[in-house]
Image: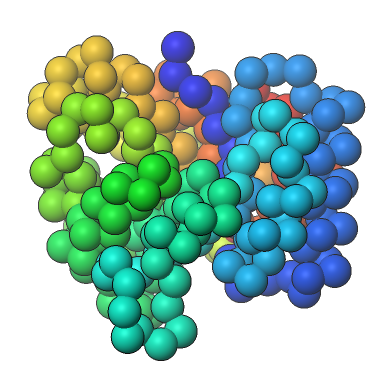
């Protein structure tokens, strides 16, 4: 059985007080209302990781994620954060390759392969993001585009390493736009990703990897997206900043 996951990516939002209030609300609501076997992940900005960790430490369904790490082990990289630092404060997951990082910080597939290795070396589970722009969607080569992202950043991994990776398919044209992929579009891409994994690692391993959908996922559309055979949950941006919406998404399974 694949792990069902709903992860909230706060991006660069919330002051400390707002973030802790949001976390406490989510902890309480998840404890009162969620009785399914789902992993909830909170990805606040680096500066709040330790404090958010403090609030979720007794919530067995909730884990902590960072939104990025550097592709070097340590050293003179002012302003950057290493995978080993994240691990040392009890972070469990790290989002890597988000389209905003690829676009605004020019992260490449090759650089992401290095980040993936460092995350795994430090026992962090990567949430690896992939997804195409509107231009690529419209030219019809979106499956090839996403396959290439996955092959170049993940396919050097051995089976045991790959099993620790969560994949998030986030079509860029659906992020923060209010435009969601249809269930057909989401299922088609998720199935294609699973098939790609099966070709490289075998069907059994491909069946174990959680593939999340991200892109304007809301309480209103989460039930039908999560009902798709190959959609194992969501990576949520905007709606993860409101406790009610986020928990309603979690309850969509
Ligand atoms: P939205 O849910 O705001 O579209 O963001 C999706 C996303 O980028 C999550 O990482």
Looking at the image, in which quadrant does ligand 1 appear? bottom right
Residue 117 position within the rendered picture, expressed as x and y whole percent measured from the top left: 24, 51
Marks counted in the figure total 0
The picture quadrant where one finds residue 41 is top right
Q: Would residue 178 be visible to someone looking at this image?
A: no
- Quadrant of the snapshot with the N terminus: top left
Q: Is residue 132 left or right of residue 247?
A: left
Q: At 87% across and 38% down in the image, what residue appears?
A: 28
Left or right: 49, with 196 as reference point: right
In the image, residue 188 sits, relative to residue 131, either above or below, namely: above
Residue found 68% across the figure and 66% down from its top: 48
Q: Is residue 72 above or below residue 79?
A: above
Q: Nearer the viewer, residue 211 or 123?
A: 123
Whole-percent x, y for residue 40 in the image:
64, 36
Is residue 1 something that shows in the picture? yes
Q: How is the image coloured?
A: rainbow
Q: Nearer the viewer, residue 87 or 144?
A: 87
**Residue at the spot 13% in from the left edge and 52% down from the top edge:** 152
Q: Nearer the viewer, residue 72 or 187?
A: 72
Residue 210, placed above or below residue 83: above
Q: Considering the image in quadrants, where does the C terminus appear?
A: top right
Residue 202 horizontal/vertical position (percent): 15, 18
Residue under the point 74% across and 60% down:
51
- Give the x, y percent position of residue 230: 40, 24
């Amino acid at each position: 059985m694949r792990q069902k996951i709903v992860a909230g990516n706060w991006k660069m939002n919330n002051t400390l007080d707002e973030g802790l209030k949001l976390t406490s609300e989510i902890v309480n609501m998840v404890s009162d209302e969620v009785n399914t076997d789902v992993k909830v992940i909170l990805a606040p900005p680096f500066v709040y990781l330790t404090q958010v960790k403090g609030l979720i430490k007794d919530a067995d369904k909730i884990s902590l994620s960072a939104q990025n790490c550097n592709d070097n082990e340590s050293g003179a990289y002012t302003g950057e954060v290493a995978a080993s630092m994240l691990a040392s404060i009890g972070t469990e997951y790290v989002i890597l390759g988000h389209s905003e990082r690829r676009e605004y910080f020019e992260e490449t597939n090759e650089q992401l392969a290095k980040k993936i290795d460092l995350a795994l070396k430090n026992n962090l589970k990567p949430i690896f993001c992939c997804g195409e722009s509107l231009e690529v969607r419209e030219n019809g080569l979106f499956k090839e585009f996403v396959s290439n992202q996955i092959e170049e950043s993940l396919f050097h991994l051995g089976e045991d390493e790959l099993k620790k990776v969560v994949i998030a398919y986030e079509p860029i044209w659906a992020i923060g736009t209010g435009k969601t992929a249809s269930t057909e579009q989401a299922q088609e891409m998720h199935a294609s990703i699973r098939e790609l994994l099966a070709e490289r690692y075998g069907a059994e391993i491909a069946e174990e990897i959680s593939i999340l959908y991200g892109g304007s996922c809301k309480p209103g559309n989460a039930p039908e997206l999560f009902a798709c055979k190959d959609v194992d949950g969501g990576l949520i941006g905007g709606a993860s900043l409101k406790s009610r919406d986020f928990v309603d998404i979690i309850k969509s399974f």
